[in-house]
Image (spheres, helix red, strand yellow):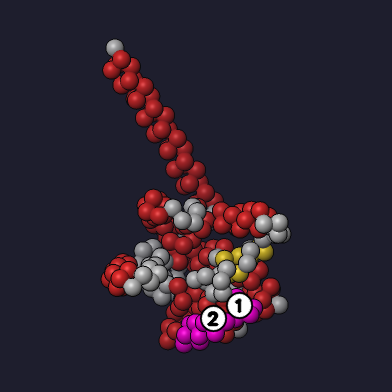
Amino acid sequence: MNAQKVLRNTKKWLIFTSKIIGVLILLLLFNIVWLKFMPVMFTSTMLSRSLEAMSKGESGVIYYQWTSYEQISAHIKVAVVASEDQRFPTHGGLDFEAIKVAVEENKTREKFNMPKRGASTISQQVAKNVFLWQGGGWFRKGIEVPITYLIEWVWGKKRILEVYLNVAEMGERTFGVEAASKRFFKKNAVALLPAEGARLAAVLPSPRRFSAQNPSNEVLYRQNHIFYQMQLLGGYSYLENMR
């Protein structure tokens, strides 16, 4: 009798859990379709940074202003691709070549207790920043992959890059190129020069440690390297055929 009761309860729990998962999947799909056309209002990282600042007795104001793809300088578009994901126009969401290189390189890095190299594409970073959360290890990665493929299919490359340029963290409580351009260069994102685009891209790996406004030697070195990579890619012509 007890075994039958346990079996019934387990079945009910599984049905309930399946319904919850189904609802979450439907909400996710709705959000993906919705955000193909609508601006992203906020992300979990923005909320986290605001709460963290307030917990320290500081201002929780987030600097963020959505701007359209057409109102963003071509130079910063090329700069972030050159810096973060050079195969962005051609891969399907994941860069398996970069993953293979990172796996091999991290074997050496691990021996010398060096930070591991990541291989996340711009598409993966958008999936994480917009729909998920920071951290989470392999569990979050497992959810991130199908979302990445979905936004590649539903949004396309231009929309993914547009969202990335709007939600990427680029300084202390500063998100997106419009807010960063105004705070650090006193101009709109559409007016960014090549060197300024490279400077903003240079802080992306660690926007809370690096500063675009008061760049360290490391940031300046990265800026010059990114500027060189932008030229090697051929400038904005490299991105012109993206759908």
Magenta stretch in the rendered image:
211-228
Residue 163: within the magenta? no
| Image spot of residue 183 (x, y percent) | 69, 73
Q: Name the residue under label 1.
A: 212
Residue 89: quadrant of the picture:
bottom left
In this rendered view, identify the residue nearer to me: 107 or 40.
107
Can residue 184 be seen from the camera position used here? yes
Q: In this view, does 180 lie to the left or right of 17?
A: right
| Image spot of residue 241 (x, y percent) | 44, 74
State the mark number for residue 52: none
Spatial CA distance of label 2 from label 1 is 8 Å
In this rendered view, identify the residue nearer to me: 236 or 118.
118
Can residue 38 be seen from the camera position used here? no
| Image spot of residue 103 (x, y percent) | 30, 68
Q: Is residue 68 left or right of residue 36?
A: right
- Residue type at mark 1: give it: Ala
Image marks 2 and 1: residues in contact by CB distance under 8 Å:
yes
The residue that appears at 40% across and 69% down in the rendered structure is 115
- Residue type at mark 2: give it: Val
Q: Mark 2 points at which residue?
A: 219
Residue 216: within the magenta? yes
| Residue 124 sits above or below residue 223 on the image | above
Give the quarter of the figure containing the C terminus: bottom left
The residue that appears at 40% across and 55% down in the rendered structure is 137
Is the residue marked by circle 2 packed among few (<14), some (14-19), or many (20+) residues within 10 Å? Answer: many
The residue that appears at 33% across and 20% down in the rendered structure is 6
Residue with the most extreme top position: 1
